[in-house]
Image (spheres, rainbow, N blue to C red):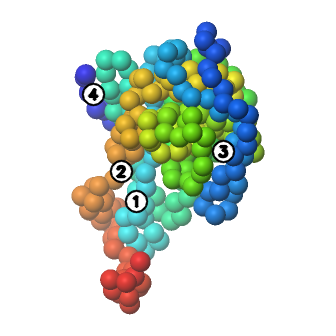
Amino acid sequence: MKVKAGQQQSLISLNRVRRQRTEPRILDEREIRLKINGIDKIRIGEFSQISLEERAHFGSIVAIDVSTVKVGISSLGEVYAIRGATVIKRSDSLTINRTRPMIVLGEISDTQVSFELEEQLKNIDSARNSMILLDGSLSEITNLDKPFSLIDTLKRSSNIIISVSKGFLFPSIRLPEEIEESPFVGSILNGRSSGEYLVRLSLGGPLLKIEVCPSIELDDVIKVLASLISLDGVEYGYPETLRIAHIYSKILPVEVLTLKCIMQKKFGIEVLREVDNRKMLLGGFWS
């Protein structure tokens, strides 16, 4: 397997933006109430085990993630750094692209959303016949001014987006014996959209919530997830390409030191480590 690493620097404007031959065994129609974080109750409808006998065909898997780190504080306010990473996995190669860390002065939240959207749209725009994996929710990308243009773009390029929410890793739930430990997918009846599902991707793996865009039938979701399991490997029940994208998006402590030196020498901005009063006052009991 060949591994290639490269640097990406340019960003695009935000304005640019299958039925199985053998029917899968659908479990008895039942409703399972699932309590997440002690707040939300999720209603699960139709369930099916994931069979690997028939899969959707994709040329590649594209996984995208973005990470931020607080560099320190300066006379201009708080200083953050943000980086994106994209992993493209084909049958015979793995390509990793990273943006250089971008420095942000002041509030990070809106900038991070914009940066992440640009990374996602850039890859969606260039991918063909690909499964695109994103971390978290699809709410931001589907709430753009022209969401239907996104769906049209996905259909024209034969791409499909799957977002994975890690917040659903270990909910307390009683599952039917037929799928107690096996890979399965179940539709979420009261989700934000019709494309939300509860899944387990490996034997004994954790439960995850995914969103699929554009919306497709459960039979087709099974085929897409079967392809993901086959192509990606889903080590430990989580997509390996998405895990690699997260690792390569992280900004290391030595890079933070480098950014501080660059800001000091090139721009005359001194960045200091922020004093944590909780640590000072509470010592080892601060957390």
How far is disc 2 from disc 4 in space, using C-alphas? 18 Å
The N terminus appears in which quarter of the rendering? top left
Q: Residue 69 bears which disc, if any?
A: 1
Left or right for 275, reference 124 = left
The front one of 262 and 283 is 283
Residue 26 x %, y %: 66, 26
Which amino acid does the dot numbered 3 rest on?
Ser
Q: Which residue is mark 3?
A: 139
> Of marks 4 and 1, which one's residue comes earlier in the chain?
4
> Of marks 2 and 1, which one's residue comes earlier in the chain?
1
> Is residue 146 in view from this perspective?
no
Q: Secondary structure at mark 1?
A: strand
Q: Secondary structure at mark 4?
A: strand
> Of marks 3 and 4, which one's residue comes earlier in the chain?
4
Which amino acid does the dot numbered 4 rest on?
Lys
How far is disc 3 from disc 2 in space, using C-alphas? 23 Å
Which amino acid does the dot numbered 2 rest on?
Lys
The C terminus appears in which quarter of the rendering? bottom left
